Amino acid sequence: MLRHEFQPGRLIAGTFLTLAGIIYAGDAADAWEAPWFTVIPLLTVGLFLAGTAAAITRAIRKRHRSAPTHTPTAPTNRS
């Protein structure tokens, strides 16, 4: 049983933000040299993909919730 709904937009955003943190941490530890502007396109693409995934997820869930459900009615006794 799920405790909350799966939100792929947050997963994508978190992945790209973690990657940006790893890039800056590697640069700070002198493991590699990363220019300061390296992370800007990475975060832009990541946030765009996260927003797109969130919008698609919301549209799918909204359509699924608004779909009419067939509720069977109890048979009536007409005797």
Image: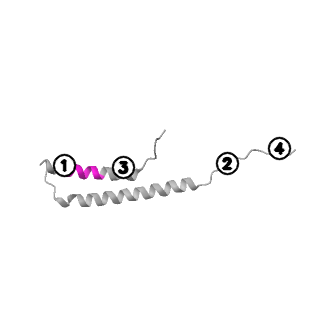
Q: Please state which amino acid type lies under the numbered disc 3.
A: Leu
Residue at 31% x, 59% y: name it.
45
Residue type (three-letter) at the residue carrying disc 2: Thr
Residue 71: mark in rendering = 2
Q: Give me the disc on residue 67.
A: none
Q: Label 2's element?
A: loop
Q: Amino acid at mark 1?
A: Ala
> First in sequence: mark 1 or mark 2?
1
- As helix, strand or loop, the secondary structure at mark 3 comes to helix
Badge 1 marks a residue whose secondary structure is helix
**Magenta includes 17?**
yes
Identify the residue position indicated by label 4 in the image.
77
Q: Which residues are magenta?
A: 16-25
Distance of label 1 from label 3 (alpha carbons): 21 Å
Amino acid at the residue labelled 4: Asn
For the residues labelled 2 and 3, the Cα–Cα distance comes to: 36 Å
Q: Which residue was labeled with disc 3?
A: 11
Q: Which percent across, then down, holds residue 29?
A: 13, 47
Q: Residue furthest front?
A: 3
31 sits to left or right of 10: left
Name the residue at 54% across, 53% down.
64
Q: Earlier in the sequence, mark 3 or mark 4?
A: 3
Q: CA distance from mark 1 to mark 2?
A: 56 Å
Tell which circle, 1 or 3, labels the residue nearer the N-terminal end: 3
Query: Which residue is located at x 28 percent, y 58 percent?
Result: 43
* Residue 42: x %, y % from top left: 26, 58
Figure label count: 4
